[in-house]
Image: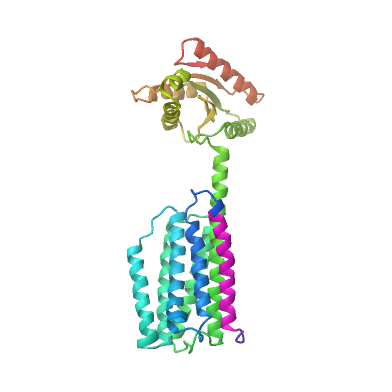
Amino acid sequence: MTNLDPRSMIATAGFMAAVMAIVLLFMRRYYPPSIRGVGAWAAAPLLWLVSTLLFGTRGYAPDWVSLVTANLMLVLGTLIYYVGTRSFLGHAFHWRIWGWVLAVSALVFVVLTYWFPNYALRVGFFSLVMFSVYAAQLNFMLRHGGPNFSVRLVEVVLALHMVVLASRLITILMGHAGSDLMEASLLQTLYIGGYVLSVLMLSIGAVLMATDRLRTELEYLATYDSLTKTLNRRALLQRCEDELERAQRYGNGPSIMMVDLDNFKTVNDTRGHQHGDAVLTHFAERTRQVLRRADRLGRYGGEEFMVLLPGADTAAAASVAQRIHATLAIGHALDCEVSIGLTSWTGSHETLDAMLSRADAALYRAKREGRNRTVVA
């Protein structure tokens, strides 16, 4: 292991950073803008690439290039990765503190390179700064990241690299700092190897987090109505089928309500479609507030909605219907009147088509009898 060339390992890190930067840049271009932080995640490996290229010029380029700027680019890239993580999870990044950290780091690197050249102190300070950035990000992700595998992967990588950095600090305190970055020693190989792996794994973690978020958003779009944020017809009917299967095994089946907004076409024609959309959204919000946790509201089509009431008999379902009528009659400018057709599970022979047919018939009967009422079938 001691024969591994540090310059070659640094070049490997640069190559991996370049590849991951390209992947993340393409993701930023083609992923929806609702997935934030990908741009910063793409910029981070680019900065790491610049850093590795500058480190690779050690012995050929001036120290302000191969040491001072290279170290700053590495710290800045890690901070930008942190920026992307906070943005991805919906939190702002506060540059005031970290901007001072960068400024102080630049000053210290210059001092320890030109005015008081000391390799051990420079590496120790650099390790301490990187440890602080990793610790801040790890703490943030533990509080806000959630239990997803991709998030846990990044947390583990951060924690492991913090162990590497802490070990590096301990070896420096013990007098084993080495003499130069390009020294082909076991400790230097382990230290640079940890950096190489962290560059790769942090980039992979970013790709996995963004991909997982994309999958979640696509699943949401395939399940929910974009306007009212209620279940769409396909997803709602699947919930109904699942509930009927459960009722076949355990009994105590569901009730179903078909809900239609009265005179909605007139609202659209006289007030415009934007007002009509606002009425639909208001209806959905108000209705959700009076449903039980297990109940499901979905948009069946146009201004017609369906409510699935698991385990509710006719009396319980009728009570929910009355609450819907009441919550839409409080005098809000977007309030509307609704007709409701209600039916309940009748036994193990029941089918969803039969329940939907009865609920539809009850709804049309409510319309014929004057609207703004509930009819039970």
When asked about the image quadrant of residue 252, the answer is top right
Mark count = 0
Q: Main secondary structure of the magenta part?
A: helix
When asked about the image quadrant of residue 245, the answer is top right
> What residue span does the magenta drawing correspond to?
4-28
Inspect the magenta stretch and tell me whether residue 15 lies in it.
Answer: yes
- Residue 195, given in percent of the width and then of the height, sits at 53, 74
**Residue at (51% x, 36% y) in the render:** 226
- Residue 154, given in percent of the width and then of the height, sits at 52, 63
Classify residue 21 as left or right of residue 70.
Answer: right
Q: Is residue 107 above or below residue 340?
A: below
- Residue 69, given in percent of the width and then of the height, sits at 43, 76
Q: Nearer the viewer, residue 171 or 376?
A: 171
- Residue projecting furthest to the front: 61
- Residue projecting furthest to the right: 349
Q: Is residue 174 above or below residue 27?
A: below
Q: Is residue 28 above or below residue 197?
A: above
What colour scheme was applied to this rendering of the protein? rainbow
Classify residue 351 as left or right of residue 95.
Answer: right
**Is residue 134 visible to the viewer in this orientation of the structure?**
no
**Is residue 294 visible to the viewer in this orientation of the structure?**
yes
- Residue 86, given in percent of the width and then of the height, sits at 43, 58
Q: Quadrant of the N terminus?
A: bottom right
**Residue at (46% x, 32% y) in the render:** 292
Q: Is residue 314 above or below residue 124?
A: above
Q: Nearer the viewer, residue 366 or 317?
A: 366
- Residue projecting furthest to the top: 369
Q: Quadrant of the C terminus?
A: top right
Q: Nearer the viewer, residue 266 or 142?
A: 266
**Residue at (57% x, 15% y) in the render:** 361
Inspect the magenta stretch and tell me whether residue 348 lies in it.
Answer: no
**Residue at (45% x, 26% y) in the render:** 273
